[in-house]
Image (cartoon, grey):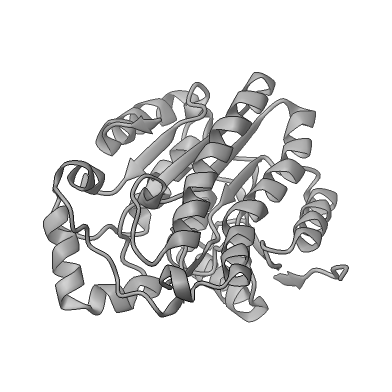
Amino acid sequence: MLRRLALRPRVLAAASAAAACAAATFAHASPSEPLDGKVALVTGASRGIGFAIAEALAAQGAHTVLTGTNPATVEDARRRLLERNPAASCSAVAFDVGDEVQCVAAVAALVAEHGRIDILVNNAGLNRRHTLDEFATAEFEHVLRANLVGPFVLSRECARSMRQRGWGRIVNVGSIMSHVGRMGLPGYNASKAGIEGLTRSLASELGGEGITVNMVGPGYIETDLTASLKGNRGFSDEVNSRTPVGRWGQPHEIAGPVAFLASPAASYVNGATLIVDGGMIETFHFGGAGAAHAPPGSAARATS
C-alpha cells in the first residue's frame, strides 16, 4: 500500500551482446529469481520506463519500492504491477527526488522498514524545452536538481546501507543525450552528461566494496511521455530513419538491461554505460548534421 512519508520541510557496444550475456549468466547466478531477498528502490516508477523496470525487478524476486511525486499515481502503479504479477512483492512511496530533505527522509524510512536497500535505480527525470534566451536560470537549476542532484543524494544515502552488507547495485538511467547535443535542451543535456560522469566517479569509489554503479542510456522510447513526439509524423519518421533497427524502443527493452545490471550476474560490470537505442547514436556520430530535434518551447517531463 502507498505511504506518503511524513517529511520535514565508456559506452558498451551492442545491447544484443549484453542481452545474450545476461541470458547466460542469469541462469548461472541463480535459478529463476536472482534478486530474491533483495530490496530495490526505483524512482519515477509510476509509468513508462520506470514502471517497466520495477516490474522486471519484481519478476526477478526483489521487493520493489515504486516511487513518484504523486501519491495517487504511484499507488495506481503498484496496483497495476500486482494485477500483472500477483506474486510480486512491492510497495509505493511518494516523494520528490529534487528535494534533498525528502530524499534523505525517504531512504531512512525505507531502511528502517526493510532493514536494507540493495538496489537503487535512479530513473526519475525532468525535461524542459526552451531556447537559450528563453531558459531561465531557476528552471535550468530545477532540471539539474531532479536529474543530477537527486540521484547523487539518493546514491549517497543508499550506499550507506549497501556498504553494511558489502553488496549493492546502483543503476542510473541516462540518455543518448549524454553524448549528443540537441537544440533547446541545455538543462537536459547537461544533466544527462553529468549523470554519466557521476556514474564513473561512484563506480571508482564503491566498486571495491562490492557495490557496482552503471548507467543505461535509452534512445527514443515509446511511452505516454513521448506520445506528442511520436505523434509528430515528421519527427517520428526521422527517428525511424536514423535508427538502424527502424523503430522506436519499448520500455521493456530498457528494463531488461537495467535488470541485468542490477543482478548478481553483472558483478564484474562497473562504471559502464550501456547505450540502448537501436543503433541511433552511431548515426548521430556519422550521419551528418541536422539531427532530429523537437521544436523547443514546451515543457515536458521525461524518464529517459
Count of picture labels = 0
Q: Looking at the picture, tell me which residue is in the foreground, 169 or 237.
A: 237
**Quarter of the figure with residue 246:** bottom left
What residue is shown at x 54% (from left), y 69% (from top)? 46
Residue 30 drawn at (x, y percent): 50, 29
Residue 117 drawn at (x, y percent): 71, 44
In this view, 97 is above or below 2 = above
Residue 50 drawn at (x, y percent): 49, 60
In this view, 280 is above or below 73 = above
What residue is shown at x 63% (from left), y 80% (from top)? 72
**Quarter of the figure with residue 11:** top left
In the picture as drawn, the residue positioned furthest to the right comes out as 8
Q: Is residue 65 left or right of residue 13?
A: right
Q: Quadrant of the C terminus?
A: bottom left
In this orientation, does residue 149 appear?
yes
In this orientation, does residue 301 appear?
no
Q: Is residue 157 left or right of residue 226?
A: right
In the picture as drawn, the residue positioned furthest to the front comes out as 133
Residue 176 drawn at (x, y percent): 36, 49
Q: Quadrant of the N terminus?
A: bottom right
Q: Looking at the picture, tell me which residue is in the foreground, 204 or 58.
A: 204
What residue is shown at x 54% (from left), y 32% (from top)? 200
What residue is shown at x 60% (from left), y 36% (from top)? 169
Q: Looking at the picture, tell me which residue is in the foreground, 182 or 276.
A: 182
Q: Is residue 248 left or right of residue 64?
A: left
In this view, 152 is above or below 186 = above
